[in-house]
Amino acid sequence: MKKLMNDSRYVVEEMVEGYVKAHPDLIKQLPENDRALVTAKETREGKVGVLIGGGSGHEPGFLGYVGEGMADGVAVGNIFASPSPDPILEVTKAIDKGAGVVYLYGNYAGDVMNFGMAAEMADLEEDIEVGMALATDDVASAPKEEKEKRRGIAGEFFIFKATGAAADFGYNLEDVVRVAKKANENTRSMGVGLTPCSLPQTGEPSFEIGDDEMEIGLGHHGEPGVEKGPLQSADEVTERLVNDILEDIEINSGDKVAVLVNGLGSTSRMELYTMFRKVEQMLSELGIEIYRSYVGDYITSLEMGGASITLMKLDDELIKTIDHPVNCPMFVQK
Amino acid sequence: MKKLMNDSRYVVEEMVEGYVKAHPDLIKQLPENDRALVTAKETREGKVGVLIGGGSGHEPGFLGYVGEGMADGVAVGNIFASPSPDPILEVTKAIDKGAGVVYLYGNYAGDVMNFGMAAEMADLEEDIEVGMALATDDVASAPKEEKEKRRGIAGEFFIFKATGAAADFGYNLEDVVRVAKKANENTRSMGVGLTPCSLPQTGEPSFEIGDDEMEIGLGHHGEPGVEKGPLQSADEVTERLVNDILEDIEINSGDKVAVLVNGLGSTSRMELYTMFRKVEQMLSELGIEIYRSYVGDYITSLEMGGASITLMKLDDELIKTIDHPVNCPMFVQK
């Protein structure tokens, strides 16, 4: 697959360099580690630090979400690979303002291991208290009874948003972690894959799929989904995804939700808004109120084709977090 | 090519319906015409109305740029086709607050005809004064001596941004049109195409290109470019595009520019930031100051692969317009 790149070994370095040069007022690299980025505005004393991270190739996730009202720093991994403990630890040291740091990341083996190691080092070597919250929003990735085994996908955006706001409100570490876990507990996603992406170093497609097929529940790195079949209409696909979510979490008439219709990379806004139209019809018929909507590319997989739908069930506290303004290089909310 | 859609005849209607449902606090359809959208916040009396428009399939262009600080309304065409005069006229009537309306659109035969007709109708039937400014930023589409024959591409974003701000500052119609024309005069774009998109109704690729080829100067609807050849590295492509721009407009050491690296649909942020890295290197070597940077999908062509680079040369007045805050459904600037 064709890509606008230079030497495939340095795609992440070159992206990060371009990114920091494009937004010098908002983000900077730490001198200790060029995979460790923090907000260019000094984090205030006593505020819990919010650290996000994961593999590259999911932009705007994760480096795009560092800024006012969201994360204070990010550890950047190779494409589709966890960051190593070093940049995580460097970011931790930089954003700790005496109130501890919360780590937010998706539930993948590599991330669990490396964020865990970094947390241990932060505790033992630096005496920094670290809290953790994993995203496990992907309904397709494990049965309901084993939510803790599920992968994190686009719902991570809501978890970052809610947690970043809670830290900004001045909550202590325990409360920030509580909000992060509640956000994850209240969030469900279901995705559909249409076309694969390719890794810059191999150029090979990330998964096999027929010219007229779709895969329901496909993971963000091409992990197998729950069902492969002929491509259906946008309404049929949306109905399937929303119904799978609603079977997994109790959302009743009168409840409020935030909705995210997320593109995986090469899916047009026209397609995403067509899907949103059906989401709105379905929720409206059930008496569920859409409190806020996000439609666009929020967590991608390079140029993968497809989309995911995420619902976050809201209570008063989560509404406050979702309303909180944000100013990040790749996401701004007034 | 696979798409998440329903009946291909109604893709624009369904997108618009989803769009308005997703952002009811920001945008609404006029009851007179469902292709006529205006800001949900009442435009204030005495402010010049800013009307944008063009074909669908370029999202966030054009309907994504209606909101505070940018356009007051948009006329929505079919895919890659000009809106008819009717929705243009309806938006004109809705957003005229006694100070006239400016039409901003790309230099394409259909748009020139339909916006011209609407302006005439607004004048004769409604007694509304209309000013017009065309985007002609695509360096590849006609020689330097015939800039007025050039197409409008991603530079339209800068023209909308500057003009929307000028209207918001309270400038009169003559001055708003002057700023729009200055923004266009100071803006140059060059694009590269890698992979075609397909129209929902035919599913056929919009142009032919080899598996390892690129086309420099390719238009937003697949119009032929100036050179087809083997795909080069991101740095080589960027160098070519920036040099073509700098040969076309005098930008000297000490001058300030706004930079837009725009994705055409399926090009990842990783690729776009890699290109920005090289733009920054080149301008920095020339002593040209990058005052503000925009990197992402701003004017697309469905799922086309490729990118464009736009430079807008800034003076004090344009700096003021580019700094002005914006709150649109698909673009927010603090």
Image: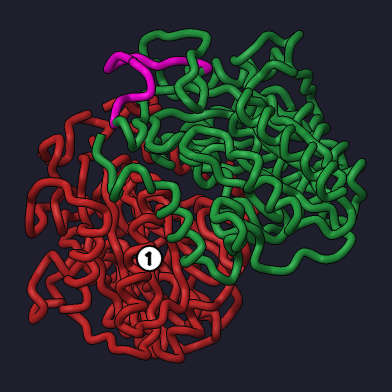
Chain colours: A red, B green
Callout 1: residue from which chain?
A
Q: What amino acid is at disc 1?
A: Leu
Q: Mark 1 = which residue?
A: A260
Answer whether residue A121 is magenta in the image: no
Q: In the image, what residue occupies the spot 74% across and 27% down?
A: B287
Where is A244 relative to A264, above or below?
below
Is there any visible trace of residue A18 in the rendered image? no
**Residue B246 or residue B198, whichever sits in front:** B198
Mark 1 surroundings within 10 Å by alpha-carbon count, few (fewer than 14), some (14 through 19), many (20 or more): many
Query: What secondary structure do most residues of the magenta stretch adopt?
Result: loop
Residue B295, x across and y down, in percent: 54, 42
Q: In the rendered structure, which segment of residues is drawn in magenta?
A: B203-217
Please tell me which residue is depicted at 51% across the width and 44% down the height of the picture: A19
Q: How many marks?
A: 1
**Residue B262 % position (x, y):** 53, 36
**Residue at left 35%, top 52%?**
A263
Residue displayed at 81% across by 46% down = B125
Mark 1 element type: strand
Quadrant position of residue B184:
top right
> Which corner quadrant holds the C terminus of chain A?
bottom right
Q: Residue B103 versus residue A122: which sits nearer the camera?
A: B103
Can see residue B137? Answer: yes
A218 on left or right of B141: left
Q: Quadrant of the N terminus of chain A?
A: top left
Q: Position of residue B159 (x, y in %)?
A: 72, 39
Q: Residue furthest front?
A: B125
